[in-house]
Amino acid sequence: MAKYSHLTGTVYELPNVIGRKERLWASKMHVGNRCEYVSGDMFQRVPGADAFVMKHILHDWSDAECVQILSNMHRAAPTGARSFVAEYIVPGPETPHFSKLFDIHMLCATSGRERTEDEYAALFDQAGWRYVETRYPASKLMGVVEAVRV
């Protein structure tokens, strides 16, 4: 939003997070006039959007919980909407990667886990989205999984 002045955005977050005004970034990033904060529960519903961006969200939750979140997004999205999920993506068994160590943390601390590209694609599919691709920076530490509402 800071780079592209024609964009507007909505930050959807729990009420107790939005209630802490000093921790919100829109004004600090000089996009406060184009960014709305909406409180709610992503397991109940999400506001509609042309694009959804989530970073380090789905890895906190079980497959069933991820499908519920993605299904709520799907219901709120118009045809052609995109979803971008930034997470650590687990590579094949022969490749050392931070995601494999972090997976142990997720398994101990939450109901979630780190996932492979195929596992993210399957979650999107179960929620009605169509997987498009996964993009990586040069480091390949994280990936951005893209899906479209058809």
Image (cartoon, helix red, strand yellow):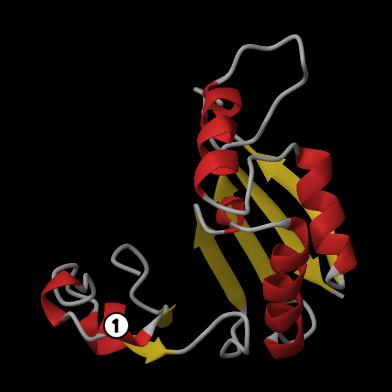
Q: Residue at x 59, y 50 (%)?
A: 59
Front one among 78 and 18: 18
Q: Quadrant of the C terminus?
A: bottom right
Q: Position of residue 101 (x, y in %)?
A: 54, 24
Q: Quadrant of the N terminus?
A: bottom left
Q: Position of residue 99 (x, y in %)?
A: 57, 29
Please tell me whether residue 1 is drawn above or below residue 75 in the rendered image: above
Front one among 89 and 4: 89
Q: Residue at x 17, y 70 (%)?
A: 23
Under circle 1, the secondary element is helix
Q: Residue at x 64, y 44 (%)?
A: 113
Q: How many marks?
A: 1
Please tell me whether residue 64 is drawn above or below residue 59 in the rendered image: below
Please tell me whether residue 128 is drawn above or below residue 88 in the rendered image: below
Q: Does residue 88 appear left or right of residue 31 in this picture?
A: right
Q: Does residue 115 appear left or right of residue 58 in this picture?
A: right
Question: Residue 15: which quarter of the image?
Answer: bottom left
Q: Does residue 92 appear left or right of residue 36 in this picture?
A: right
Q: Which residue is mark 1?
A: 16
Q: Position of residue 71 (x, y in %)?
A: 76, 77
Q: Position of residue 92 (x, y in %)?
A: 77, 20
Q: Amino acid type of disc 1?
A: Asn
Crowd tier of the residue under label 1, counting other residues whose Cα lies within 10 Å: few below 14, some 14–19, many 20 or above: few
Q: Residue furthest front?
A: 108
Question: Residue 50: which quarter of the image?
Answer: bottom right
Please tell me whether residue 53 is drawn above or below residue 131 in the rendered image: below
